[in-house]
Image (cartoon, rainbow, N blue to C red):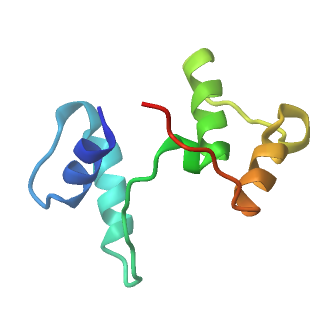
Amino acid sequence: MDSTTAINILSASNHMEQRYCILVQQFQELLNKSWEVKISHIYREGNKAADFLANKGHTSSIGYHDFEVSDSGLAFWILYDILGIFQTRLI
């Protein structure tokens, strides 16, 4: 699923993707709370910490994983993102 599809599923009030039904319902409940929420797409190069976690998750077994920020290398990528360092997307 690409990010546009995810945004469309979360934004639709009556569309329920069967595979993601519970997850979509939980996100929609959060979106309906009395706060301002904006969903937007950002390329993985713009959020290295999320990219790092996505790669870790992709290579890990299914289930809950607790990562120590200092031990996993995540702290480096969080700092990288905080400082606004980015690289251009190669297509």
Outermost residue, right direction? Answer: 70
Q: Residue at x 37, y 71 (%)?
A: 38
Q: Residue at x 65, y 26 (%)?
A: 56
Viewer-proximal residue among 82 and 27: 82
- Residue 85 at x, y percent in the picture: 71, 54
Q: Is residue 6 left or right of residue 16?
A: right
Q: For the image shown, how many numbered marks are present on the structure?
A: 0
Viewer-proximal residue among 39 and 89: 89
- Residue 75 at x, y percent in the picture: 83, 46
Outermost residue, left direction? Answer: 14
Residue 40, picture quadrant = bottom left
- Residue 82 at x, y percent in the picture: 74, 62
- Residue 91 at x, y percent in the picture: 42, 30
Q: Is residue 55 left or right of residue 68?
A: left
Asked if 73 appears above or below 43 in the picture, the reply is above
Residue 12, picture quadrant = bottom left
Q: Is residue 38 left or right of residue 16?
A: right
Asked if 35 appears above or below 20 in the picture, the reply is below
| Quadrant occupied by the N terminus | top left
Q: Residue at x 90, y 42 (%)?
A: 70
